[in-house]
Amino acid sequence: MTPATATQTFKILAADKLAQQGLDWIAAQPDAELVNKPGLSESEYAAMLAEGGIQAMIVRSGIKVTREVLANPGDLKVIARAGVGVDNIDLAAATEKGILVVNTAEASTITTAEHAFALMIALLRNIGPAYKTMTGGGWDRSKFQGRQLSGLTLGVVGFGRIGQTVAQRALAFGMKVVAYDPVFNSPTALDGQVKMYNDFSAMLPEADVLTFHVPLNDATRGMLDDEAFGRCRKGVYVVNAARGGVVDEAGLLKALDDGRCGGAAVDVYSSEPPPADSALRVHPKLLCTPHLGASTKEAQEAVSSDAAAACLAYLRGEGIKGAVNAGGLRVDLNDQQHGFVDLAGRMARLLSPMITRGVARVEIELAGKELAKAAGTVERAAMVGLLRGHLDDPVNMINVADVAQRRGIKTKTAVIDEPTEQGPQLTIVVHGPDGSVDGKTHPADRTRRIAGRVYDDLKPRVVEINGYAMDMTPDGHMVILQNEDLPGMIGTVGMAFGDAGVNIADMTISRRDTGDGKATALMVLKTDAKADEALVGRLSHTPGVLKIASVELPG
């Protein structure tokens, strides 16, 4: 990227209401011109960009930067999200237009961690109900006897930026800390002060208090449910300031009522705001706040200023910070090489839901010397696809190598000169940590493998998943289902989709002997609509179904 000339002025559009500190910072820059236009419609922003002249756009969560907004982006080169999530920005459309998307994830780390910690203290010391009693004229000290943090064990679920920040504060309060993170490949963290687990169920009995700091996806949705409460210490306390839906709300209420959960503090909800008559609002053992995790003056000023600074740094040619989309792809690859980069990401996203016990190392093999030039980019694309769904922190083509290194994940990419008999091929093998599961060693449970090819039509193909041979194009709405090879399974699955109103557009089925006279099968289905949580949950409890996951891939 060529540094900008000293005389160039960059026009920055503030398309959401930003903290004044950020606006003032932009206005004070000699090479920046502020266009402060929050609250317009998508069509108005689309027209404004199409006129040209705007190089950067800063948003929060108030507007959606859709494909229509970016249809003719004019001179737009960077979009900054003043905050963490980028769900309101069409990343694919931005990438296709060559627009960098950045966010300011680090700016709200301390604020979010502090709120989770404040909820924990308030919960264990009964601050909420005691306050309500006082404002009602009461005074009942004995009713509100609480627990001190010192000496208790905190279980941190998700050990990214925020999880680690909470853990540091817990240690300062004299708490013992354990943590679960499926892609943190080290037995301990924070200089040996935190014992790490790759198995969520194994960590549960160790904790007096659980605090959640994970993204919401198929692997984390409802991870603390009625069944999981049965593995916890009786009377465990729960704090959820991460994402609504990570803690199953029905299961939580049941556990509060029967005493398995001693109390809960919740800042996020599966539906926001929760209904006015929601039991979450009035349960006597539940402390609730209206999604205040990042709502501090300091955080809002920081995300505003950081977003503006990230935009100008990129426009000035000073570097990239907080990149979210795949801005690091090499542009000097041929069509076939680009095809394998795209294939790597798709294959990894298919494999990702199958990784439930951690990642120790990833081996990538490219068969065909013509793919050597793309090896580094293929590796990054594969790692992004594998890790993104497991991390709360943003992971992308630019930062994925650093993310993997910090988590102790080893990667190895090899290029073999000779292609396979069918042509060049990409293979990804993911190895879990050494050790045992439930006291028994299960090597097959700790290795995941997928292979694919790009043929002359440049379309991606998957030719093997975990030893199941196939030939399918990975795109769109997909469901991967492993089952016992029993009569009627195809009909059972098809009927379940039909009852849910989801049409199966394509199905690939492969069988594999288990060595004991039996066999298992793998169904890979492409559907016209996404298989929702209810359908996946219903099938997961169907006799004969061993594993199921829903995956969304680009078209």
Image (tube, helix red, strand yellow):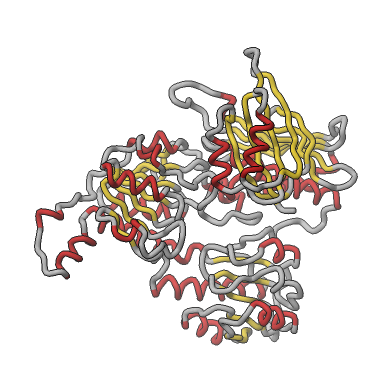
Please provide percent x and percent y for residue 497: 65, 42
* Quadrant in which the N terminus is drawn: bottom right
Please provide percent x and percent y for residue 7: 70, 86
Q: In this view, does 184 lie above or below 118?
A: above
> Can residue 520 be seen from the camera position used here?
yes
Residue furthest out toward the top: 517
Residue 92 falls in which quadrant of the image?
bottom right
Please provide percent x and percent y for residue 185: 50, 39
Give the residue displayed 65% in from the left and 35% down from the top.
Answer: 493
Please provide percent x and percent y for residue 221: 49, 47
Residue furthest out toward the right: 456
488 or 158: which is nearer to us? 488
Give the residue displayed 59% in from the left and 85% down from the top.
Answer: 37
Give the residue displayed 33% in from the left and 35% down from the top.
Answer: 205
Compared across the picture, whether 199 is left or right of 173 comes to: right
Compared across the picture, whether 103 is left or right of 521 comes to: left
> Can residue 385 be seen from the camera position used here?
no
Compared across the picture, whether 107 is left or right of 402 comes to: left
Looking at the rendered structure, the number of numbered marks drawn on it comes to 0
Compared across the picture, whether 331 is left or right of 447 comes to: right
259 or 501: which is nearer to us? 501
385 or 276: which is nearer to us? 276
